[in-house]
Amino acid sequence: MAELALRGGKKTFSGFWPAWPVYGEEDEQALVDVLRSRNWGGYPAPNQRAREFAAAFAAAHDARYGICAANGTVTLEVALRACGVKAGDEVIVTPYTWIATAGAPVTVNAVPVFADVDPDTYCLDPAAVEAAVCERSRAIIAVHLGGSLADLDALVEIADKHDLVLIEDCAHMHGAKWRGKGVGSHGQLGSFSFQSSKLMTAGEGGIILTSDEELEQRCQSHVNCGRKEPGYDRFEGLVFSGNYRMTEFQAALLQVRLGHLERERVLRQAHAEYLDGLLAEVDGVRPMARDERTTHPACYQYIFRYDPEAFGGASRDRFVEALCAEGVPADGDFYVPIYRSPLFPITADRFPAIRERYGERIDPERIDCPVAEKAAYREAVWLHHPLLMADKAEIDAIAEAIRKIAEHADELRE
C-alpha cells in the first residue's frame, strides 16, 4: 500500500494555511478615511499620505528620502533614469529573479548583462559581477532574494572601484538589515514592491529609497510626469516621463501595514530558523546559508536546495508535486532564468541598444549562468511566506511531510 499522498496515501497536512494578505479594523478605517476625504489620487505629488508613508518607510530602512510610485517595476526604471543611465549603457543584473530586474534596463534602452548567482544564497555572485564589468558598465542591480541578502560589502566595493551605481532591488526584503542598516540604503538607490504577494502590500505599489538629495528630486519628477514642483525643482534640466504616482488609498493602507511589519518579520524569521533546524536532519535537503552580517533577516520565500540523488534520482519537480500532495504548497520553477522566460522576448528591432552585445536578440544559449540554471530547474524549492505565519505545529508538519517523502522516495518514480 502506498504511503505518499501522491500515490493515494494519507496526506500529512489537511488543514488550512494562513491567508494573505492580512487586514484588520485599522486597515478598513484608513481606507474609509481616504474615501471620505475625497482626496484619493496621487496628485498633487507626493500627496499627503504618500508623503507621510514615504518618510516613515525611508526612516525604517535608514534612508533619508522615500519616493512612492505605482509599482515595483517602474521604481527600477525611474531609479535608472534618475541616475543617468542612457541608451547603450550596460547594467549588470542577476538572471534568477522576476523579469522586471532585467526588463528595467531594456525599457530605458540600456543593456542588461547577466552575472551568475552564488550557490549558497542565489543572489548575485560578486566574482561574476566583477568579471562582467567593462567600459560600458554603468550600474549594478542587486536583488535580495527569498530570504537571503546579496553580499553588500563586496558589491559596494565593486561599485566604488569601477564608479558604478548600485541599485538594490528589495522587492522581497521589507524590514531587512545588513550590518544593522536597512536594505535599500546601502547603494545609491533602493527599490521595493508592494504587489499582492509581498511582505507589505497594498495590492500594488512601490517605493524608491535614496539618501542623495538630487536623486530624490529627479525621482520625484520622473514619478510625476516630469514636473518640477517646489521641493523637487532644484536639479538642472528637465526630464521626460510619465504618471507613476501612488494613490492615497494605497499609501493609507501601507501606513497601517508598516506598523505591523517588524512583528510579522520576527515571527516569520523565528519559524524559518526553526524549520532550518528540522530540515538539517533530512538527507538531500539543505536550507540556504544564513549570513551573520544579515542582522535583521526577512523571509519572503523560504528556499531550500534539493538533491535528487538522495531521493532515488527523482527530479525536483516530482518532489515538489509530492510535497504539494502532502498538503504543503510549494514551487520549484517559481523563477526561471530571465533570459529563458517567455515574458522576455527581447529583440533588436524593438530595442536596438542590445545589438552590439547580443546581436538581433537576447539568445539564452549564448548566456552562461550554470548556477542559476541549476537552481531554476533542478535544485530550488520555494515555500511562500504565509506558511511561516502559521503555528509551530504547522511548521512541524512541513518537515514531517518532507521526511515522509524522503523515507518513501521509491514511490516518487514516475
Image (spheres, rainbow, N blue to C red):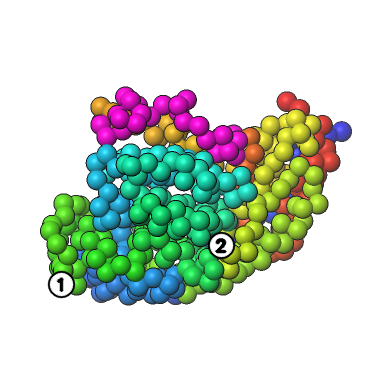
Given contact means CB atoms under 8 Å apart, are the residues at marks 1 and 2 in contact? Answer: no
User: In the image, residue 78 lies at what x, y percent?
Assistant: 28, 54
Residue count near mark 2 (Cα–Cα under 10 Å), binned few <14, some 14–19, many ≥20: many
Report the disc number at residue 241.
Answer: none
Question: Which SS does the magenta portion mostly show?
Answer: helix
User: In the image, residue 296 lies at what x, y percent?
Assistant: 57, 68
* Residue annotated with mark 2: 298
**Spatial CA span between label 1 and label 2:** 36 Å
- Residue at 47% across, 74% down: 259
State the quadrant of the N terminus. Answer: top right
Q: Which residues are magenta?
A: 352-377
* Residue annotated with mark 1: 230
Q: Amino acid at mark 1?
A: Pro
Residue count near mark 1 (Cα–Cα under 10 Å), binned few <14, some 14–19, many ≥20: few
The answer to whether residue 149 shows anywhere in this view is yes
State the quadrant of the C terminus. Answer: top right
SS of the residue at dot 2?
loop
Q: Nearer the viewer, residue 247 or 101?
A: 101
- Residue at 44% across, 34% down: 339
Above or below for 150 versus 410: below
Q: Nearer the viewer, residue 58 or 83?
A: 83
Corner quadrant of residue 292: bottom right
Horizontal relation, residue 30 to residue 221: left or right? right
SS of the residue at dot 1?
loop
- Residue at 39% across, 70% down: 63
User: In the image, residue 294 lies at what x, y percent?
Assistant: 58, 64
- Residue at 77% across, 53% down: 280
